[in-house]
Amino acid sequence: MAILYYSDTASYPQQVLAITGALKTYMAEQLYYNDSLADAKARFLVADQTDDASLREATKKFFDSNQKYPFTTYNIGDEEPVTDRRNSWAKSGKYYSSTYSCYIDAKPLKQTFPMISFFNNPHDYEHCKKILQNISDSAIKLDVPIVVNGISTTFTAEVKFQAIDKGGLAYEFIEYLTKNNIFNLMHNIEVYYHSFVINTDTNPIDTMNATVFQEDPEDDSLNTSVGSGLAPLTPALLSSIPTDESSGIAVGSGIVLTFNVGMNPDSVERNLDITPYFEHSKRWNEYYTQLTLTPWSDLSSGVAYTIDITQDWELYDSPIAIFNEEPIETDIEINFTTI
C-alpha cells in the first residue's frame, strides 16, 4: 500500500475527489495494465510537484515503502472557470430538476492534475510514452458516479492531455534522477466538468442533500438523503399579472408570468408574442420560474392587449422546461384592457 506523503486531500470538495478517483482508476488501467486494479492504483502517489525537494523526498519514501518501478506522482492542481463548455444543464444557470426534486446550478470548470511517472529503465519509459501519446489523441470521457437526493446517477468529465515530455524539473532533482538511473515523464492532465451547487433553501419539498461517491463506488457512507416528493413534470402557467380577461389595467403596469417549473428562457421568449406590440425588457427570476415584461413607456389607454406563448413546432422549438425538456402543457393566452 502506497504511503501518502501529503495527506491533505480531505480539504478538497467531494466532487473533485470523485473526479480524482475516477481519473486515477482510468490512468492505472492504461499505464499498469499487467497489475490488478488495486496494485495498479497503489503505484500512484500524491506529491507536491511544485517543490523539487518535496518531490524527491516523496518519491524516495514511496520507493522505500514499495520497492517497485514504475510509479506515478500526481497532485490536484488549480481550478478555473470556463465559458465555452456549457451544456444543457448549465446554459441558463440555475434550473429546477423535477427528476432530483431540487434547484441545481451547474458551473463549467477546468481542473488541472499534474502527473509525473518514474522508470528505472529506458524500455519502460519509451513504452509508457507511446501509451500516453496514443490515449492523448483520443476523446476521453469519464463517467463519475454521483448521488443526488438519493438517486444514483453520473456526471461526465472530459479529459485532455497537455504536453508529454521530460518537463522542466530543477537541476538538483534531475541530477538525483540521473545519478540513480531514473527516467521521468511529465503528463499533466486537464479535466473539464460541471460543478453542481444544490439549492436547499427554496426547494419546494423542504430540504435535501447532494453527495458524491468517493473512490470506492460501493462505499455509500457519504450518501444521505433528506426529504422526498415529486415536482410537476409538465410545465404550465400558474398565474399571471394581469389575469386573463381583466380590464381597467393601469397604463404603467408590467406583465408577470409565473410557471410551475423552471423554464428555458430562450424557448419561451422565441414563442412569446404581444399584440399590439410594445417595446419592453424581459427579466427572469434566478430559478427561471417567473418572467417579468416591463414596457419601456406607458401602454396606450383603452387598448386590448394579448400575450401569447404558443407551441408552434413548425416555426420554433416549443417552450420547454430547463431540465427535463418537457413542452408546455397548452398554448398560453392572456387578454387584458388598459384604462
Image: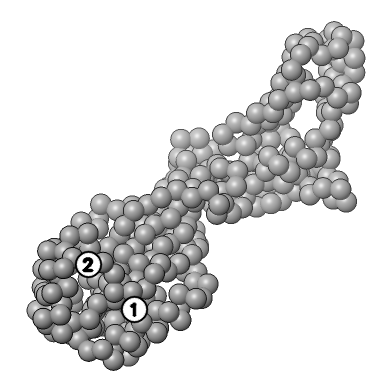
Residue under numbered circle 1? 28
Amino acid marked by disc 2: Leu
Task: Give the Cα distance between marks 2 and 1.
Answer: 24 Å
The answer to whether marks 2 and 1 mark residues whose Cβ atoms lie closer than 8 Å is no
The quarter of the picture where residue 308 lies is top right
Residue 145 visible in the current orientation: no
Which x, y percent locates residue 86? Answer: 57, 52
Please name the residue shown 71% across and 25% down the image: 281
Which residue is at the front of the view, 234 or 338?
Answer: 338
Judge the density around disc 2: few (<14), some (14-19), many (≥20) Cα neighbours within 10 Å: some
Please name the residue shown 28% across and 91% down the image: 123
Of marks 2 and 1, which one's residue comes earlier in the chain?
1
Which residue is at the front of the view, 90 or 258?
Answer: 90
Amino acid marked by disc 1: Ala
Residue under numbered circle 2? 169
Residue 321's place in the image compared with 259, above or below, is below
Which residue is at the front of the view, 120 or 332?
Answer: 120
Residue 177's place in the image compared with 326, above or below, is below
Which x, y percent locates residue 7? Answer: 18, 60
Q: Quadrant of the N terminus?
A: bottom left
**Label 1 residue SS:** helix
Q: Is residue 44 left or right of residue 27?
A: left
Residue 133's place in the image compared with 267, above or below, is below
Q: Is residue 176 left or right of residue 264?
A: left
Which color scheme does this rendered protein use? one colour
Q: Quadrant of the C terminus?
A: top right
Please name the residue shown 45% across and 75% down the image: 136
Q: Is residue 300 left or right of residue 225?
A: right
The quarter of the picture where residue 119 lies is bottom left
Please name the residue shown 89% across and 23% down the image: 276
**Label 2 residue SS:** loop
Residue 266 visible in the current orientation: yes
